[in-house]
Structure formats: structure tokens, C-alpha cells
Amino acid sequence: MAIDNQKKAEILAEALPNIQMYRNKIIVVKYGGNAMVNEELKKTVMHDLVYLSTMGIKTVLVHGGGPEINKTLEKMNIESRFADGLRVTDKETVNVVQMVLAGKVNKDLVCHIGNLGGHAIGLSGMDGGMLKCKPLDEKHGFVGKITELNMEAVIETLGNGWIPVISTIGFDADGNCYNINADTAAAAIAGALKAEALISMTDIVGLCEDKDDPETLIHKVYISDTPALIAKGIISGGMIPKIDAMTKALRQGCKKAFIIDGRVPHSILMEMLTDEGMGTMFKIN
């Protein structure tokens, strides 16, 4: 249904208090899943980031790129293997991860933002000593656990009014590259930056009491309630590490965290600039 000009003006006017609340504050957006492989959705996500940046909101984009990595590995006849939801990353695979994430995926996103009138700089966790790592464990190979963060390059980029676009690879003292889970990296960055918000784009509507019924969406969760939600099975499977990462971000100084449905066009704007929102918000009590 078409929206007339008066309605459009009313929507913008209603967004003003939220724009003022976030202005000059930092938000971190974790981007991946279906919103990354669907070109139309990708365009709307980049549009939202440019819009927020134009409104004076300091926007950081942290991205993965699993589907593109899988596609490249397949072309190179390298098997994709996973354990506990994480990619098993041997030396050959981590070279591909570095090439795809810091190269093709990162620069494609920077280009999209530029074509929409925004200003972006592509970075990786290896740039400026941003994400120093050690191996997560032996079975995952070159999957990194973050040990140190340096946000100087990100802060410098934000200070110049640009959007940092960060690929989730890190390094160790011997110069090895590590593949880092995107949720883990985004949460660590949001905590280190004391961000106003961490927004995780997923392939679900949010946290639901019944995972098969979107009408049971839980709009707000305090992190002290998460153990009970895990015990009830409401938080389960791959959602547990995602919420663990968010919890760490909140405890390190990020003000609030959201899980939103990246399959919905302009979901970032709907969550941030409307009173109703559209996903699940996590806060410390």
C-alpha cells in the first residue's frame, strides 16, 4: 500500500526522539545470513547504515561471509567442515577465509555504501592490531579466541565521519591469521567501544517463547534471566553462544543489544527509530 507524503512526514517526525538519542553515539551492526546473500536485502541494509551515518550516528559494520567462503572452498575442491557450529579451519582454509572476508566481501560492502552516497573504510581485525587472538582449541584449528583489542583505527575512522566495515579475522604474535566467529567479534568490538547498541542481524524474528511461533516474540530480556530461559529451552542451540557474546558485550559497557530479523527490509531502522521495535532487546537489569 502506498504511503502519502503526509504519512511519510509523520513517520519521520516520530523518529526524531530516537535519532536524537543515538546521535553522536556508537552502534555496532553484526551482518550476515540471508541479508548478506540476497542482493536486494543487502542494498537495504547498506541504505540503512548510510541513513544512520547521515543522521550523525556513529555506525560500525562487522561482517562475516560464510556462504561466500563455502562457495569459494567448493570451487577450490576444499571440503567445508564444522564442529559445534564453528568452521573447522586448517591452514589452507584460513588462507581462503582471509582472501574472501578481507578481500571480496569486505570491498563489495564498502563499494555498496559508497554507491549509496556514504563513506566507508574497509578494515580487518588484522589492521592496526585490532583483534589479537590465540587458538580457540585444537579441534577447530585456526579459529581464534580474542585476547586483546585495539580500537584506535575504528575510533579514528568514526571521528572522520566514515563507516568502518570490519571483516572478522584476527592475528597472533607469529603472524598467523585466525577466523573469528562474527557474533563473537561484533560483541567484543561493541564492548570495547562502549557502544550504545549492538545489533545482531539473524535469520529469525528474535527470541520467541515458541521458536515456531513468531507471535510469541519476547521483546525485552534482562541478562540475569537468561539462565532460566536456557533451562526452559527457550534459548537453545546456536542461540546460546550468540547470547553469551551479547552478555559479554553488555558487561563490558555496551548499553543494549538487539537480535533482529535480517530478512526484513529496513529492519535496522525499524528497531532503532520506532518505539515498537521489531526484535528482542537485551539489557543489564
Image: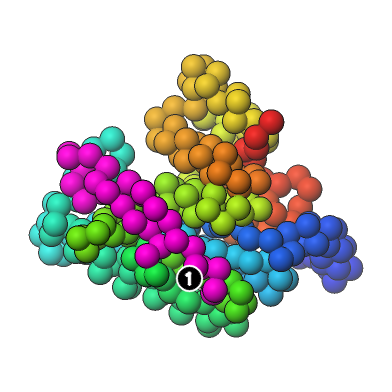
**Quarter of the image where the C terminus is located:** top right
Q: Nearer the viewer, residue 243 or 113?
A: 243
Q: In this view, does 44 lie to the left or right of 153?
A: right
Whether residue 158 appears in this view of the structure is yes
Quadrant assignment, res 119: bottom right
Provide residue 26's location: percent of width, then percent of height.
Answer: 63, 60
Give the total of numbered labels.
1
Q: Does the magenta stretch include residue 98?
A: no
What's the colour scheme? rainbow
- Farthest residue, direction front: 173
Q: Nearer the viewer, residue 151 or 278?
A: 151
- Residue, x 54% and y 73% (percent of image)? 156
Q: Is residue 153 magenta?
A: yes
Provide residue 248's location: percent of width, then percent of height.
Answer: 51, 39
Quadrant assignment, res 93: bottom left
Q: Nearer the viewer, residue 198 or 45?
A: 198
Q: Name the residue under label 1.
A: 153
Q: How crowded is mark 1: few (under 14 residues within 10 Å), some or many (20 or more)?
A: some
- Farthest residue, direction left: 77
Provide residue 277's location: percent of width, then percent of height.
Answer: 71, 47
Residue 262's place in the image compared with 216, above or below, is below
For badge 1, the amino acid type reads Ala
Q: What element carries label 1?
A: helix
Q: Is residue 115 left or right of residue 131?
A: right
Please provide the residue range marked out in magenta: 129-157
- Residue, x 61% and y 47% (percent of image)? 254
Provide residue 253's location: percent of width, then percent of height.
Answer: 60, 46
- Residue, x 47% and y 35% (percent of image)? 244
Residue 122's place in the image compared with 193, above or below, is below
Q: Is residue 239 left or right of residue 144?
A: right
Q: Is residue 168 left or right of residue 247?
A: left
- Residue, x 43% and y 56% (percent of image)? 149
